[in-house]
Image (cartoon, grey):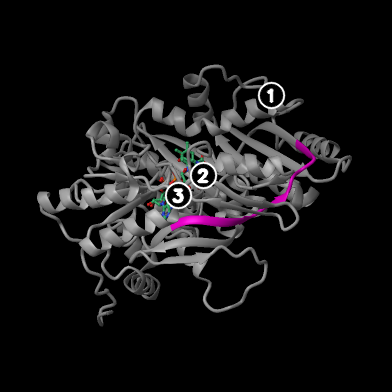
């Protein structure tokens, strides 16, 4: 049902009368039981607002099924009633992807109770897990078996496997292991009509038609609901080294990164950039943190090296690269962690950037990527463009420099009201994105499109690409019931 103009015949969800909605809720409760359904405003409140506080939705019910069978019945019932559904994991989306709309007609389906580890095979190096398990619990299960689930993000204690896959999360280790997409061998999905697709295969090779699982990865809940996954594990490193460096420029950070790549690309587990502005906010707002360097600087890099070999010369390599960089004036000062506690303390300085920005006031986030070689140019040009647009705006750029993904965030000028600043969010995002486009980058590297950025899709992904996405949506969710208003404009 695709028209000549490339738009689809996807229908709109129905708005039920209050009586019909009440009847639907009674039927939902019959499926999930009283513990599986929340309807009181006080109980549903955490499910209708996003982590950033940008959206305040409404829902008549949050449904919390306990297994795939219950979830499939819930979807079948909602589909028959023509009611929209919003799949929700840990609700840590940075783009409002998991919150329902304000019209009060969308049912939230929370995966939180579907959190079991189903199987772990240390020979096949696979973890089979339900979608509602937190990323942290999945990492812990892998660690207990002597393996590594090589995905690490600041929200890992709350974000769930389903949300991680639905957003194709990236994080700190992408430089070495890739994104969430690269770790998926199999999936189980409840389709928009309630059919269950069990694709929980754990094969390394399987060329049997279209690769369906990758359709649902990164679809942000707009095509179906992920209920379980088979994830690929990696060998657990035996040695890890972490260092924090202060640097004279972003160019120096890029040079340092390439030196570590030349030393041993396979050992670079993370290479993160932080600006002096962002670091100052962390030191200001987060209790108990301190800078393990002689003095503050305008730029910092955090490098983590890891190896599965004991006695592989990792520490010596780190020190050699750092001392050569010090001699070349690429590094001002460096602190190498001597214990697990020191490693965690260095990482905390990086991972608390989002929280400290939030405590400082309103921010506009740009989760952008460019080719790694162009990161310095991105930061330089986008900073200038934003400062020209709004004098006093504070650039807080940080992120995963090793894979080209910079969180080019802007903090409100100290003299400006938060609301006045946020009212100009599109103007600010468009200013940054103009530079990103010029550098052949992307407007969303890892957080997705959600509800915040569908407006950018026609401009960035228009033509055949967006047309094809719409056809896929129409084929898999012809009634338009799965997370409407997200991703596609
Ligand atoms: P939710 O926020 O609940 O949902 C996200 C999207 O996925 C929504 O569209 C939702 O409808 C859909 N969804 C959720 N569960 C399912 C399911 N089972 N089936 C189908 N669709 C589903 N992201 C990164 O990539 N890298 C980072 O380094 C990073 N750091 C962060 C740090 C902080 C402090 C915070 C708050 C967020 C960070 N994020 C990061 C963003 C966020 O944590 C990720 O996008 C994460 O993958 C979302 O997981 P979630 O379970 O919270 O998903
Ligand atoms: C991170 O890398 C997250 O810390 C969040 O992706 C970034 O707050 C942000 O913009
Ligand atoms: Zn990030």
Locate residue 82 relative to residue 341 in the image: left or right: left
Q: Is residue 309 left or right of residue 484?
A: right
Q: SS for tag 2?
A: loop
Above or below residue 198? Residue 263 is: above
Q: Between 446 and 316, which is closer to the camera in this rendering?
A: 446
Q: Quadrant of the N terminus?
A: bottom left
On the image, the x and y values in percent for residue 305 come to: 74, 41
Identify the magenta region.
226-240
Q: Secondary structure at mark 1?
A: helix
**Badges 3 and 2: C-beta atoms under 8 Å apart?**
no
Asked if ligand 1 lies within 8 A of label 3, the reply is yes
User: Closer to the camera, 420 or 352?
Assistant: 352
Name the element at disc 3.
loop
Task: Give the foreground label among 1 and 2.
Answer: 2
Q: Which mark is residue 341?
A: 1
At x 50%, y 58%, the residue is 439
Q: Which residue is mark 2?
A: 133
């Amino acid at each position: 049902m695709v028209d000549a103009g490339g738009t689809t015949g996807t229908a709109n969800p129905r708005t039920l009368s209050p009586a019909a909605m009440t009847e639907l809720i009674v039927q939902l409760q019959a499926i999930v039981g009283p513990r599986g359904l929340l309807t009181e405003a006080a109980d549903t409140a955490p499910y209708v607002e996003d982590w950033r506080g940008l959206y305040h939705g409404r829902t008549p019910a949050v449904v919390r099924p306990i297994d795939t069978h219950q979830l499939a019945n819930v979807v079948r019932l909602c589909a028959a009633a023509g009611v929209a559904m919003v799949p929700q994991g840990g609700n840590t989306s940075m783009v409002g992807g998991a919150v329902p709309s304000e019209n009060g007609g969308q049912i939230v389906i929370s995966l939180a109770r579907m959190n079991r580890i189903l199987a772990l095979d240390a020979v096949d190096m696979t973890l089979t897990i339900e979608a509602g398990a937190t990323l942290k619990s999945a990492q812990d299960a892998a660690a207990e078996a002597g393996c590594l689930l090589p995905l690490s993000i600041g929200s890992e204690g709350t974000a769930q496997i389903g949300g991680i896959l639905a957003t194709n999360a990236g994080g700190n280790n992408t430089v070495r292991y890739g994104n969430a997409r690269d770790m998926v061998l199999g999936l189980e999905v409840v389709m928009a009509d309630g059919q269950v697709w069990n694709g929980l295969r754990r094969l390394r090779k399987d060329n049997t038609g279209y690769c369906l699982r990758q359709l649902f990865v990164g679809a942000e809940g707009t095509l179906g609901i992920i209920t379980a996954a088979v994830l690929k594990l990696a060998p657990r490193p035996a040695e890890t080294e972490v260092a924090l460096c202060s640097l004279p420029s972003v160019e120096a950070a890029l040079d340092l990164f390439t030196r570590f790549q030349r030393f041993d690309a396979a050992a670079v587990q993370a290479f993160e950039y932080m600006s002096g502005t962002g670091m100052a906010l962390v030191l200001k707002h987060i209790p108990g943190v301190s800078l393990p360097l002689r003095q503050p600087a305008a730029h910092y890099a955090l490098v983590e090296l890891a190896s599965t070999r004991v006695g592989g010369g990792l520490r010596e390599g780190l020190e050699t690269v750092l001392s050569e960089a010090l001699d070349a004036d690429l590094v001002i000062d460096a602190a190498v962690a001597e214990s697990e506690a020191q490693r965690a303390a260095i990482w905390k300085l990086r991972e608390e950037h989002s929280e400290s920005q939030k405590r400082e006031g309103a921010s506009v986030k740009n989760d952008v990527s460019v080719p790694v070689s162009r990161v310095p140019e991105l930061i330089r040009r986008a900073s200038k463009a934003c400062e020209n647009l709004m004098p006093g705006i504070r650039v807080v750029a940080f992120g995963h420099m090793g894979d080209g993904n910079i969180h080019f965030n802007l903090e409100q000028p100290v003299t400006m009201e938060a609301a006045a600043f946020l009212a100009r969010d599109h103007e600010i995002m468009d200013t940054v994105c103009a530079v990103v486009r010029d550098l052949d980058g992307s407007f969303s590297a890892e957080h997705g499109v959600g509800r915040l950025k569908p407006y950018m899709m026609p401009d960035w992904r228009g033509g055949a690409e967006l047309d094809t996405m719409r056809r896929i949506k129409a084929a898999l969710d012809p009634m338009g019931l799965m997370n409407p208003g997200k991703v596609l404009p």
